[in-house]
Structure formats: structure tokens, C-alpha cells
């Protein structure tokens, strides 16, 4: 049951597509329930760490445009992921750093500078009722998050209490008027790995149907850029490029799919399955994008190009270990700064 909270966030403008997401609804795929969770786990977890939350606290994921919101109490917030011009009462709010918003002040997201998704974390997390053990929003299923949907103007979301119950260090933050910022907090890495550069390079492990594709298809998949199309969403990044043909038609029994699986439907144009993927699929899987590279893909925009580089399973596991080490160091540094 959700705790009663005296702090409420009021939505004055929702943005294009703003959803509550924690780390996902695990353990229900066998019943056809999507996992959901953040598209960019790096930014989600880092934003939580910057305000002293655990990894799994619910955060607001905003796509392409941000909201305008206000809080009924002084609130510690952090913005991570895509870079936006954000202001409070006309003063800029820093990215990748915690800041205190005074009660009643308005946080207003302006133009997007880079990336696709920004994450707004609040100390204590958003305290909506969990559904099947998660506060993540599943729009297609109309469950979780805030009434199972994207935010609308006038919504009022409850903010929870911090894990340890400690109040904010407001006295030392109120040394001067305006917007206080935690000056001793180290600036976190601004973007997930591999997002820099004109093309997004995605490492992948060949999938179970790799050998079912023609030699030309396998060569093209590893050497030719694929563009991200306008049809992409939280369910999958749809790509456009050379047609990936099979050696011969395949009839496959549907099987479980995972975040990062690259399916190839009959039109030969690959789809990288993302956070809101279905629980099972029957299209051939040419590969699996390494988990460490998925945050970069989540921040990509339609029109950008991706390139695929094959690695083996051991290399993919090493990449994830490095990803976790780097992220945990940043999160630990943020947590120490709040002590």
C-alpha cells in the first residue's frame, strides 16, 4: 500500500510522453505481462543516486519534451539523461546534479539540446501504488505508474519519504536566495557510454538464427549503417537499411524475448526490442545488443544511424561488468555526498 505523503507534485504541462518508471515489473512475462522499466537504466539509476534513493525508486521518464511541474514542499531533485534547458523561476537548473526546489517554485523544461529521454528523480521517489510489484507504467496494458497512463495537465503525484527518513540539509542549502544546489556533489557522467559521435555503435552477440541468414545479410548487418525510423517507440527501435534475407523461409515457435533482442520480420528490416517489448516473439533473431549499449540506443533519435559490431558472449559479459562498475562508482560518490 502506498504511504500517505504530504508532498505532491502538480503537473502544469505534461510534456509529450512523461511516464513513471522503476526498474521494471519482473517475474510476470510467462503470463504475457511486459517488464517495462526505464529505457535508459544508466540515467534512471544515476538520477536516483543523486537524490539518495535506491536504484528501484520510481522516476519520471520524459521523451523529447519535458513537463512543467511544481511541488508542495521543498524537494530534492535531479535531472539525468537527455540534456534539456530547464529552469526554476527563470534560473537554470543543472543537469546531472542534485538541486533543491523550494515549495511552490515551478520547474519548467525548455528546449531539448541532445538525447531523447530525460529522467526526473525526487528524493523519496514517486509514491504511487505498485501493480504486480512495480510502479512502472505500461500504457498498452493501462496499468502501473499513475493510473496506467502518461501524465496529463492537473495530475497530482505523491512524493515518498527518503529511505532513512532523514530531512534534507536545508539549512546549509539556504545560505543564499534563489535555487540552492548541492555544491559538494560531484557532477555525474552526463551521458551513457557510446552516445558520442555521429553514429551509435552497438555491440551484439549473434543470435540463435544468425546462420539462417544469407552471407550477404550477415555482412551487411555488421558493415552498413541502419537508420532509426519514426515508427520507433518504447516497444522497439525500428531500423531501416539493407534487407536482411534468410537462406530459406523459417517457421518458428514463439519464444521468450529480452531487452536488446534484434528480430527480423518478413520485410527484412530489423527491430531492436526495448523496455515495453512483448513477452514472446516468433521472428528470427539475428542477434542481441549488449546490455551495456542499450542506454545509448535508448537516447537515440529517429534519423540517427546505428552500426553493429559482433562480439562473443564473454566479451558481452565483460562489457556489462565494466558498465556496472562505472555506474556503481558514480552512484556511490553521489550517495556519499548526501551523508
Image (spheres, rainbow, N blue to C red):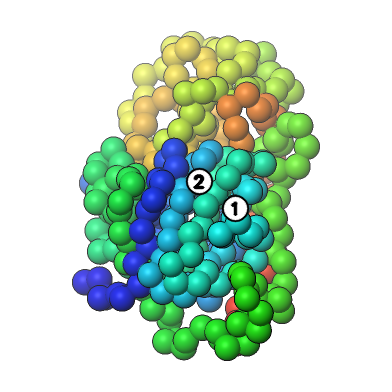
Where does residue 133 sit, x and y in percent of width and height? 28, 63
* Secondary structure of residue under mark 1: strand
Residue visible at 30% across and 51% down in the picture: 154
Q: Is residue 61 above or below residue 337?
A: above
Please give left or right for residue 198 compared with residue 177 in the image. Answer: right
Where does residue 39 sit, x and y in percent of width and height? 50, 47
Q: Which residue occupies the foreground of this view, 179 or 155? A: 179
Residue visible at 56% across and 60% down in the picture: 88
Q: Is residue 321 above or below residue 277?
A: below
Please give left or right for residue 5 compared with residue 285 in the image. Answer: left
Q: Which residue occupies the foreground of this view, 310 or 25? A: 25
Q: Which residue occupies the foreground of this view, 252 or 19? A: 19
The reply to whether the C-beta atoms of the residues labelled 1 and 2 are less than 8 Å apart is yes
Q: Residues within 10 Å of mark 1 (few under 14, many from 20)?
A: many
* Residue 281 position by quadrant: top left
Q: Which residue occupies the foreground of this view, 81 or 194? A: 81
Marking on residue 86 = 1
Where does residue 160 sit, x and y in percent of width and height? 36, 73
Residue visible at 48% across and 64% down in the picture: 105
Determine which residue is flagged by label 2. 66
Please give left or right for residue 129 compared with residue 42 in the image. Answer: left
* Secondary structure of residue under mark 2: loop
Residue visible at 38% across and 78% down in the picture: 161
Amino acid at each position: 500500500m502506498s504511504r500517505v505523503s504530504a508532498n505532491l507534485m502538480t503537473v502544469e504541462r505534461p510534456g509529450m510522453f512523461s511516464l513513471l518508471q522503476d526498474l521494471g515489473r519482473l517475474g510476470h512475462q510467462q503470463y504475457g505481462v511486459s517488464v517495462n522499466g526505464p529505457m535508459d537504466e544508466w540515467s534512471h539509476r544515476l538520477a536516483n543516486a543523486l537524490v539518495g534513493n535506491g536504484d528501484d525508486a520510481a522516476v519520471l521518464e520524459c521523451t523529447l519534451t519535458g513537463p512543467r511541474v511544481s511541488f508542495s514542499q521543498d524537494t530534492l531533485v535531479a535531472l539525468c539523461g537527455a540534456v534539456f534547458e530547464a529552469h526554476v523561476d527563470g534560473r537554470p537548473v543543472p543537469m546531472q546534479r542534485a538541486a533543491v526546489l523550494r515549495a511552490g517554485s515551478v520547474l519548467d523544461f525548455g528546449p531539448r539540446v541532445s538525447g531523447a529521454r530525460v529522467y526526473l528523480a525526487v528524493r523519496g521517489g514517486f509514491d504511487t501504488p505498485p501493480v504486480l510489484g512495480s510502479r512502472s507504467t505500461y500504457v498498452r496494458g493501462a496499468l502501473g505508474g499513475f493510473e496506467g497512463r502518461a501524465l496529463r495537465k492537473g495530475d497530482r503525484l505523491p512524493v515518498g519519504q527518503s529511505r532513512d527518513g532523514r530531512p534534507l540539509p536545508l539549512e546549509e542549502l539556504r545560505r543564499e536566495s534563489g535555487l540552492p544546489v548541492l555544491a559538494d556533489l560531484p557532477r555525474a557522467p552526463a551521458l551513457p557510454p557510446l552516445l558520442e559521435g555521429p553514429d551509435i555503435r552497438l555491440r551484439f552477440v549473434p543470435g540463435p538464427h544468425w546462420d539462417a541468414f544469407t552471407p550477404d545479410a550477415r555482412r551487411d548487418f555488421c558493415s552498413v549503417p541502419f537508420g532509426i525510423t519514426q515508427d520507433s517507440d518504447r516497444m522497439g527501435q525500428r531500423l531501416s537499411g539493407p534487407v536482411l534475407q534468410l537462406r530459406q523461409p523459417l517457421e518458428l515457435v514463439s519464444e521468450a524475448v529480452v531487452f536488446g533482442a534484434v528480430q527480423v520480420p518478413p520485410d527484412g528490416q530489423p527491430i531492436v526490442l526495448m523496455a515495453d517489448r512483448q513477452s514472446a516473439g516468433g521472428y528470427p533473431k539475428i542477434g542481441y545488443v549488449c546490455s551495456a549499449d542499450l542506454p545509448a540506443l535508448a537516447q537515440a533519435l529517429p534519423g540517427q544511424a546505428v552500426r553493429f559490431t559482433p562480439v562473443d558472449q564473454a566479451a558481452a559479459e565483460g562489457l556489462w561488468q565494466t558498465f556496472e562498475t562505472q555506474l556503481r562508482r558514480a552512484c556511490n560518490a553521489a550517495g556519499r555526498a548526501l551523508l
